């Protein structure tokens, strides 16, 4: 996602491929923007997408269905479907490329909007900067890449500061950091600067090179017993490997200068 589609007519169109029962979303290049196993459309197919759900360790399971989840970047709508259908959350997805939304509705089981689902064809930078959205997201998932997947499209300090403001108190943000041109240390430092002393952690990179960073707004790090109990509950209810996430989390140091 870069600019409004009115000023970027050459925005890459969504394209589809399938291999061994998995349907993939692309933006006119071989880079994978999302995936769905055709016979299990409501499962999370990609490992890094599963790890984006690490926020569940930091939310009381009893209140997840009452929370509002926001996704910046629709991809193949995996997280959007999972939050809306599996977790019964109020869910908002923000996607700039209209062909991605169309492809998700046609080929990736994304349902029509309803009382608990809203899919917006909008620039994520505009959405997070809107004062009307301050404090409205209990969960924020950020996964913003263009057709080249070289680095996050929105990755400056002002963007992460706006993401922090978007979160409600005790909200949790997860960010996918990946790309040939990306600097993990620089991006992670900007996220930590936005969270201004609140806990910020990262998971080990996947074999493909995706690193998920998670920030906790206005909450202390839960104790190990609480995290272990939640991990067991998550695995029982969703089959996601939450206990594995616990073993791969590490705290990020406070930044000195993220610029």
Image (spheres, helix red, strand yellow):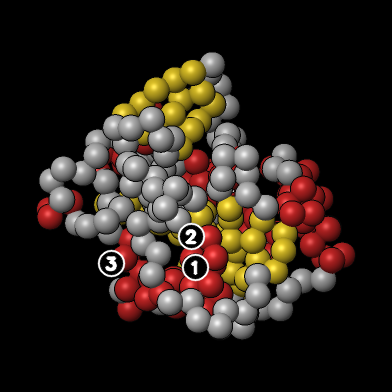
Point out residue 189 in the picture as x, y percentages from the top left corner: 53, 72
Quick one: label 2, few (<14), some, or many (20+) residues within 10 Å?
Answer: few
Q: Residue at x 19, y 56 (%)?
A: 4
Task: State whether residue 64 is above or below residue 150.
Answer: below
Quick one: label 1, few (<14), some, or many (20+) residues within 10 Å?
Answer: some
Question: Is residue 220 found left or right of 157 in the rendered image?
Answer: right
Disc 1 versus disc 3: nearer the observer: 1
Task: State whether residue 236 is above or below residue 127.
Answer: above
Quadrant for residue 208, please give it. top right
Question: Is residue 212 found left or right of 98 in the rendered image?
Answer: right
Point out residue 244 in the picture as x, y percentages from the top left corner: 77, 48
| Residue 138 visible to the viewer | no
Whether tag 1 and tag 3 are in contact, CB under 8 A, the answer is no
Report the disc number at residue 186: 1
From the image, tell me which residue sits under label 2: 183
Mark 2 vs mark 3: which is more N-terminal? 3
Mark 1 vs mark 3: which is more N-terminal? 3
Task: State whether residue 179 is above or below residue 154.
Answer: above
Point out residue 78 in the picture as x, y percentages from the top left corner: 50, 41
Question: Is residue 9 found left or right of 72 in the rendered image?
Answer: left
Q: Quadrant of the C terminus?
A: bottom left
Helix, strand or loop under label 1: helix
- Extreme right residue here? 225
Q: Residue at x 58, y 53 (%)?
A: 211
Q: Residue at x 56, y 83 (%)?
A: 256
Q: Label 2 to label 1, Cα distance in Å? A: 5 Å
Helix, strand or loop under label 3: helix
Report the disc number at residue 126: 3
Whether tag 2 and tag 1 are in contact, CB under 8 A, the answer is yes
């Amino acid at each position: 996602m870069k600019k409004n589609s009115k000023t970027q007519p050459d925005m890459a169109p969504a394209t589809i491929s399938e291999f061994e029962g998995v349907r993939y979303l692309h933006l006119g290049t071989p880079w994978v923007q999302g995936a769905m196993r055709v016979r299990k459309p409501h499962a999370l197919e990609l490992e890094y997408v599963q790890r984006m759900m690490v926020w569940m360790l930091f939310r009381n399971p009893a209140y997840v269905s009452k929370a509002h989840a926001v996704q910046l970047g629709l991809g193949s709508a995996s997280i959007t479907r999972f939050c809306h259908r599996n977790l019964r959350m109020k869910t908002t997805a923000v996607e700039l490329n209209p062909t991605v939304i169309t492809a998700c509705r046609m080929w990736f089981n994304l349902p029509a909007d309803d009382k608990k689902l809203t899919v917006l064809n909008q620039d994520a930078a505009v959405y997070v900067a809107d004062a009307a959205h301050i404090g409205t997201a209990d969960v924020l998932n950020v996964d913003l890449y263009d057709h080249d997947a070289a680095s996050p499209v929105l990755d400056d300090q002002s963007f992460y500061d706006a993401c922090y403001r978007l979160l409600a108190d005790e909200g949790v943000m997860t960010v996918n950091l990946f790309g040939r041109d990306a600097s993990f240390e620089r991006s992670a430092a900007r996220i930590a600067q936005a969270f201004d002393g609140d806990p910020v952690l990262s998971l080990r990179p996947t074999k493909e090179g995706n690193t998920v960073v998670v920030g906790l707004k206005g909450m202390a790090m839960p104790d190990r017993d609480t995290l272990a109990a939640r991990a067991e509950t998550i695995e029982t209810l969703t089959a996601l490997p939450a206990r594995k996430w616990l073993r791969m989390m590490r705290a990020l140091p406070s930044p000195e200068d993220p610029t």
